[in-house]
Amino acid sequence: MTRIIPVRETILACAILVLIVLVASRFSGFVAPSNLANVFNDTAPLIILALGQMVVILTRCIDLSVAANLALTGMAVAMINVAMPGLPIPAIITIAIMIGAMMGAINGILVWKLSIPPIVVTLGTMTIFRGVIFLISDGKWVNSHEMSPAFTGFPRTVLLGLPVMSWTAVMTIIIFGIMMARTPFGRSIFAVGGNPHAAVYTGINVGKTQFWAFVVSGALAGLTGYLWVARYAVAYVDIAGGFELEVVAACVIGGISIAGGIGSVGGAVLGAIFLGVVKNALPVVNISPFWQLAISGSAILIAVAFNARAGRAKGRIILKSAETTQ
Amino acid sequence: MTTQPAPASSPTTTSLTPPVVSMDMITKNFPGVKALDEVKLDLYPGQVTALVGENGAGKSTTVKILTGIYRTDGGTIRIDGKPVSFISPNDAADVGITAIHQETVLFDELSVAENIYIGHAPRTPFGLIDTGEMHRAAAKLLKDIGAPFSPQTQLRDLGIANKHLVAIARALSVDARVVIMDEPTAALSHKEIEELYDLVEKLKSQGKAILFISHKFNEIFRIADRYTVFRDGAFVGEGVISDITEDQLVTMMVGRSVDQIFPARIHDVGDEVLKVVGYAHPTEFFDINFTLNRGEILGFYGLVGAGRSEFMQALFGITKPSKGVCRINGEIRVIRSPADAVNNGIVYVPEDRGKQGAIIGLPIFQNITLPSLGRTSRRGFLQLAEEFKLAREYSERLDLRAASLDQDVGNLSGGNQQKVVIAKWLATQPQVIILDEPTKGIDIGSKAAVHEFMAELASQGLSVIMVSSEIPEIIGMSDRVIVMRDGLIATELAGDELTPETLVRHAAGITTTAESPTA
């Protein structure tokens, strides 16, 4: 946050650079600015969702329903677009965010008021949301020819050299950077995850903070739902299947402690970019998809091991001499 | 450590069988504290010895030495007259010493028999657990102690009293000769306590030596045969219960000297700040009424489980009282959440500071400003400059030693972390600060610093409620003291009435009207 050189983030950034340099040594076209921009654009949904997931994980929860939320919102706005092709895009985006936030609120209420463990709540709602998509769509696809050109064109519209999809991710990063560092809500998120008991005594409502974290995560899932469906110009029951695990992985690689309270916007973004680079770079240099999975998996383990070590170093200092050298 | 002329009672009466366990000249040091100073304790077969003393007298340390958790720094422990040294808890278990703790250490998801024999279950020739034999043996043990449930019962289906029986059966399963019971009745209801007494009688009749630790005088006089009194880590006296009265025992426990040095305070008490009327809770406390004035330190004394912390949590809005009104500066205020309490100028520094104190992972300044974010933000955005200003002001006031306010709290020493927690509360500019056991578990030097600081806060016009179980601290610091017992206010004491004897008597519910006049 306010540290001059955040160690974890620097290491991760170096790892990404090394990866890019290695790939570039085999295939120089990879580092062309246009290609890097494509990689970023491709990673944008992951970045946006990872930021939402970060907020949830920081409060000692987890949101496994993000991908299902994304798919449900995507299907809903696609069907709205088919029914009312004239509805302007800002209205569609607003609806998508509201639907997503509403589903996040369902998660949040169950965690807050009924004290059900978040992993159970979101595992349940994940399945329910997928079921709802089937119910509202009858299992049918909404294809590109049914959607209006404005609907599918918006995420690809290029502004100042980058598509709207990328700009959305950039804006989300900026907003979250400010929210986490500069608002009472952001601060209470860290407090709730860092020490929930102390947070209670400080006058922070832990359950309510977790509720709002789920709403934020849901709202971003809703926004991404529209962008995803519009970009790929198709909506069906199974879109983004299993994507929630990639989102959680991005957070873990980015140094967001799964035990809550520790993490940063920069970390979540870099974690997502790392996965994005692995996914886009390895096929280019003819490395099989199997290795891609193995590398992602190893990155998760290395990140967790690294975080566990960092956490252990912060023990109690008993020696007076050791304290003064701090 | 002063040695008081203890009214040590007459040397043990008639010729007894020699003690099973004999602790002699046992000393135990912790950094900055002498927890035990050449104490002695003898336990006899078939007899219940009550170990009596105030908080900090060294009872728990003694238990931990007897069970091999701590090693002694001097003195000898003899078992059947032979010196032994306990290197690990296993050594204590090997000679037949077993302890039943306040919170029993059992496994809810296992059966009663499995709990009794976990770690030493009977085996079949193939090395597997012999379930049949285990159940038979467990059934016999349970029958011996009169337990009304079968070995196959799941532990989670049992109440606290029955869980105690399982713990006792477990103790017997290892052929214990010495059973240590550390406040076994603290969490039990009246009927369950009676059952426990029966069980103690049964153990006695089987020739076990029992060490019984309790704060409740009625039960000490009911079931103990002998007593040993410790005070401030030193041996005061021992003898046979029938030779001593409750008053004599209280005198031995608290001694005459409150010779710890407390900061001199001018009792300059101002207007009423807080008035609590008729606070009640369905299960924890009832009819709590008191007033608190500006610049006053109000002590809350009582035994563990008297409902002090529970009431404070209700006053702070963590739990909800079923009845009662709270007036702040004369105006009725409703406190439904800790946020309401903080907004009304009431802050609470809880007992468990490790768990409820600083937020590790946030830098120092963010810990300090956390409850004051409303003041350090403008139009919903935090102003870092304001935050630093506020944090600097209060960390300087508390003489907090840190390289930078941007440093992670986790890297600070315990004492400095505590300062961060207190700075956090002072930064909210409270009117009432509730300190729950403010000096529990800290060394004497730090204690003095906390006391001095408390006195300073009061002199600056802050009203302090101090919950404490330490008699010297309560007497040395408080303007007035409220004694709670079993969830009720037993009495309010001030001035000359404020003596160790009256405090203990009211807290323990000793009704004998001795020389001291009490309301």
Image (spheres, coloured by chain):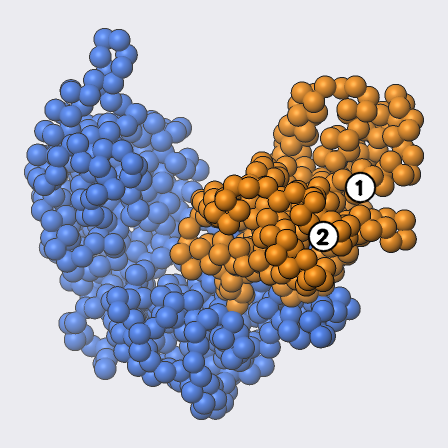
Chain colours: A orange, B blue
Q: Indicate left or right for A15 with B298 as reference.
A: right
Question: Are marks 1 and 2 in one subunit?
Answer: yes
Q: Give me the disc on residue A40.
A: 1
Secondary structure beneath dot 1 equals helix
In depth, the one of B114 and A323 nearer the eye is B114
Q: Residue at x 80, y 28 (%)?
A: A281
In depth, the one of B419 and A90 nearer the eye is A90
Q: Whole-percent x and y of residue B483?
A: 31, 73
> What residue does disc 2 label?
A148
Q: Could you tell me how far apart the alpha carbons at marks 1 and 2 are, in whole angstroms?
A: 26 Å
Q: Whole-percent x and y of residue B372?
A: 62, 71
Secondary structure beneath dot 2 equals loop
Amino acid identity at mark 2: Ser
Q: Residue at x 74, y 36 (%)?
A: A276
In depth, the one of A207 and A212 nearer the eye is A212
What chain does badge 1 belong to? A
Q: Residue at x 13, y 44 (%)?
A: B200
Q: Whole-percent x and y of residue B494?
A: 36, 81
Q: Residues within 10 Å of mark 2 (few under 14, many from 20)?
A: some
Observer-side mark, 1 or 2, equals 2
